[in-house]
Image: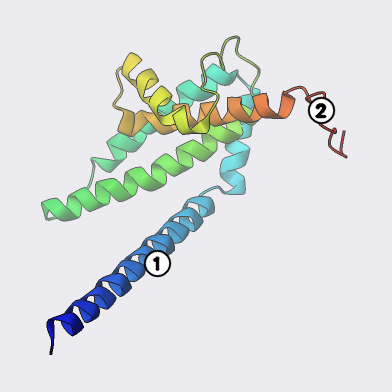
Amino acid sequence: MRAKDVAIISGIVVTLSTILCCLSVIWDSKKAVEKERALDTPELAAMGKAFGKRGDQRACETEAHRRVKSCQKLALQTESEGVLDALGEVAETMEWCGAETMHFHKHCLSTAAESEGFCDGVPESPAEFYEWASRKCELIEIHPNSCAFVFETSAAFCYERRTKTAPVDAGQAPDAAD
C-alpha cells in the first residue's frame, strides 16, 4: 500500500471516529435530558408549589440549599465495595437528587411571594448565569459544584420574569395574545 493510500484511509477512519463520538455525545445528552425531565413529577411540582405558597422567594432558595446539603449526606452514605463504585454512586445520587432539588426550587419560585431585591444583580444573559451563581456560592461558603444550580435556577426565574414583563419596543408589534 502506498503512503498516500494509508493517509487517505487514516483520514477516513479519523473522520468516522469523530462523527461516531459526536453522535454518542448527542445521544447521551438527549438521554440525560429525558432522565432529568422524568424527575419533574406532578408530586414534586405540588410539593414545591405548596412550599412556595407558604413563603417568599428567599425561603425557596434557602430550602433548595438545605435539600442540596441533604443530597450530599445521602450521597456519602454509600455502601459500595470499591472506591470507583462509591464515586459512581455518589455522582449518580447527586445527579438525581440535584435535579429533583432544581425542579422543586423552580416550582417553589412559581408560587412564592416576592422577596425585595431577589432578582437584583442577575445577569442580563443566561450565558453569564454560572459565573454569577458561582460567586454567590462563594459568598455563602458552599462549593459551586454543589450550589450553583440553585442560584442558576433563581437566575433563570428572574430572567424569564424580566423578559416576559419587558416593555414592547415602539417599533415592535405586540403579540397577538396581548
- Could you tell me residue 91's position as x and y percent? 28, 47
The amino acid type found where label 1 is placed reads Leu
* Distance Cα–Cα, label 1 vs label 2: 42 Å
Q: Mark 1 Cα within 10 Å, few/some/many (few <14, many 20+)?
A: few
| Residue that label 2 marks | 171
Would residue 69 be seen by someone viewing this image from the given angle? no
| Residue that label 1 marks | 23
Asked whether 142 or 131 is in front, the reply is: 131
Q: Is mark 2 on a helix, strand or loop?
A: loop
Q: Residue 111 carries which label?
A: none
**Vertical placement of residue 136 versus 28, above or below:** above
**Vertical placement of residue 74 versus 154, above or below:** below
Is residue 178 toward the left or the right of residue 23 in the image?
Answer: right
- Could you tell me residue 64's position as x and y percent? 46, 29
**Vertical placement of residue 58 versus 75, above or below:** above
Q: Quadrant of residue 8?
A: bottom left
Is residue 80 toward the left or the right of residue 61 in the image?
Answer: left
Q: Mark 2 Cα within 10 Å, few/some/many (few <14, many 20+)?
A: few
Asked whether 86 or 157 is in front, the reply is: 157
Going from N to C along the chain, the mark reached first, 1 or 2, is 1
Name the outermost residue toward the top.
116
Q: Specify the quadrant that holds the N terminus.
A: bottom left
Asked whether 159 or 3 is in front, the reply is: 3
The amino acid type found where label 2 is placed reads Gly
Q: Specify the quadrant that holds the C terminus.
A: top right
Give the tally of numbered discs.
Answer: 2
